[in-house]
Amino acid sequence: MAEKTLHLRRGGTSVVLELGDHELPCVVHWGPDLGEVGQADLRGLLHASRPPYVDSQLTAPPRVSLLPMHSAGWLGRPGLLGSRDGRDWSVAFDSVRHEVVDGADSAQVARLVSVGTDPAGGLEVRTELELHPSGLLRVRAAVRNVGDPDYAVQLVQPALPVPADAAELLDMAGRWGRERTPQRRPFDQGTWLREAWGGRPGLDSATFLAAGEHGFGFRSGRVWGVHLAWSGNQVVAAERTSTGWRVLGGGELLLPGEMLLATGEEYVSPWLTASWGEGLDELSARYHRFLRARPEHPGRPRPVLLNVWEAVYFDHDLPRLLDLADRAAALGVERFVLDDGWFLGRRDDTRGLGDWVVDPAVWPDGLGPLVDRVHGLGMEFGLWFEPEMVNLDSELARSHPDWVLGTAHGPGPASRHQHVLDLTRADSYGHILEAISTLVARYGIGYLKWDHNRPLVDAGSGAGREPAVHAQTLAVYRMMAELKSRHPGLEIESCASGGGRIDLGVMALADRVWVSDCIDAHERHRLVRWTGLTLPPELMGTHVGSGADHTTGRMLGLDFRAGTAVWGHMGIEWDLARASDSDLEALRAWVAFHKSVRGLLHTGDVVRADLPDPALQLDGVVAADRSDALFRLSALDHDLTWPLGRVRLPGLDPDRAYRVTAAAPGDLPARRSGAPPWAAEGVVLPGRVLAEVGVQAPSLRPDELVLLRVTAV
């Protein structure tokens, strides 16, 4: 057949594909925009990029499709695995048809849908590739059973090739309270797998898998990466073959028998999202632009909130909470969130989950008195739920033991004294939906903190206890969507023991994530920086805690805590009744400062400097028109150099002049004795000079920061 090519261009990204009559699309190029390239040149590119014949096509396949197939000669990790009781496990296509939607309007999504038919195997396989105006790429695949009997899907894992420049891998590691810890390794021959089997991406989630040039950073080094938009069991993988192929892929992990397709049924994989960049900042910016372009993206200013968890824990007392509400409103707080402990029998974490009824023993008049005070003070009211979970010591579990996910061995091990409620059942799903919806309507609740504290192990449903992680994940999506449909304006925070569920699957329905249960400002510098690879600041909850951190015990100054918390969707997690008058006054000033800059922080381009000294961290947000910027320079350890040297400010317009000033309230190092001369009144310099030469840093002790406002003049 004649070679056929397709060139898609959006947002500074080009994707060139080879379209065959018997094979799913093969990526020839994914990366920098190639400009206007004619068909003759594209055919020349195909010819020029074919590897030489070695000893057989099986040794060196000339192309790798979006769904790599063993039947096409791919000897690596297959993109599709399944069978009919051991039959029809090899998939090959008699024909593949391609449909392209690529209008001239670059503001629209360019889309390629390809359908391969395998009559001998009784299968139809579809791939979908989308290139968005942001330059973000999305790929997914579907398998339809058109034969008989049932077809069991084991794995559907789309993959994208990257060039040989991709010599180093980056992903994340973590645990509770220490999520998003970056780790690097060479992109050696073999396969690097990151799997999540707990029914959520997990606290140790890879989050993002990137491959780039040696030593790539935020501002330099070409890099490619993938993220799976899915909240259940999953895998992301990087594979380098002996024949030189390097691919990044990902998909859902399915339990045995979990995806059994009857005739006419199909399975659709989650979206594998992908981006590239000259440095991680450019790669990250495509995700931020993609998310901000969605119609469901939060559009109004993000309300500063107070969450009462670290103030009262389970000790719910109306006068104390009313006092907290008064104090919060006086600080400029705009949303008051009542956390765990308000429902039936919930005096500690051993009981009550699933009984979503206001406890009359603690709240004899219901939540009305507190809600009325909160609303009267001009604040929104938010409430904590854990809809997917249940304590065995609850009225719900005693009345409906069959509503608990489990196996023939029982409900499995408890975690935090809790198990998982089976939302795949219509009765349990309807019960929880109505309980939450009733409370939202009754009290005018505007915000749900949606928690998820037990991984899904032994998650079987029904009389046969069939695996149910996939169906449970879809049920959670469906419930979130239904609640938001019933209650327009309702916002949801995704929390899962902290940052265990921050994927782009749940973010299609959630309005922010709880980055971590650890709000230690020192740790939060790492957490927010690396969570921000995919999520822009307005989607990340960042709170000011009390002096002694709840999880680490670290004592940190208020200016450092508050200066860290402004860098996202700001909140407070502190018993304000125990705060001194001076602390409250300082906190009020920081809240006002955040409100003055959140329009910039929540719309601008995030930039991060690659500083030679690991003791320092510089993050910034630059307005889209480059007229305004805010930078945060932080000392996270002792520095070998004293005083500190110059810091360069990236992302500015090189041909505009800017005034640089110390921006924030508090006792900041830029205002102290010994501060650099420019800090007192500011300095005006061209953007090119600020990026290439920089300004002298103020002297910072460990766990101190300075905020710099950079405004075009």
Image (cartoon, rainbow, N blue to C red):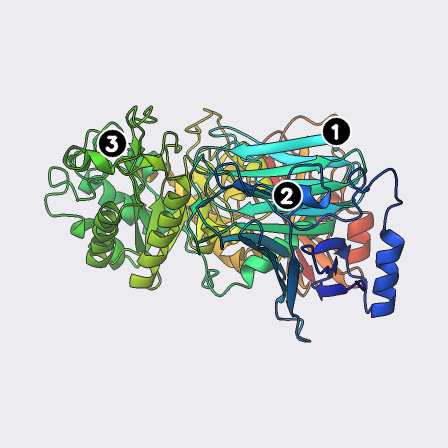
Which one is earlier in the sequence, the residue at label 3 or at label 1?
Answer: 3
* Secondary structure beneath label 3: loop
Disc 2 residue type? Gly
Q: In front here: 311 or 156? A: 156
Residue type pointed to by label 3: Asn
Vertical arrangement, residue 166 with respect to residue 408, above or below: below
Which mark is on residue 391? 3
State the residue in front, 358 or 677.
Answer: 358
| 3 vs 1, front mark | 3
Residue 152 marker: none
Q: Bin the neighbour count of mark 3 within 10 Å (Cα to Cα): few under 14, some 14-19, many 20 and up.
A: many
Sequence-wise, which precedes: disc 2 or disc 3?
Answer: 2
82 lies left or right of 661:
left
Q: Disc 2 marks which residue?
A: 249
The spot of residue 299 in percent (x, y) is: 47, 64
Q: Is residue 134 visible?
A: no
Kindly state the secondary structure of the residue where label 1 is placed. loop
Identify residue for label 1.
642
Check disc 2 and report its element: helix, strand or loop. Answer: strand
Quarter in which the C terminus is drawn = bottom right
Q: Is residue 84 visible?
A: yes
Query: What's the residue type where badge 1 is placed?
Result: Trp
Residue 593 placement, left or right of 462? right
> Which quarter shows the N terminus?
bottom right
Q: Position of residue 109 (x, y in %)?
A: 61, 67
Relative to 485, 140 lies left or right: right
Q: Choose between 187 and 115: the one closer to the eye.
A: 115
* Residue 662 screen position, x and y as percent: 63, 49
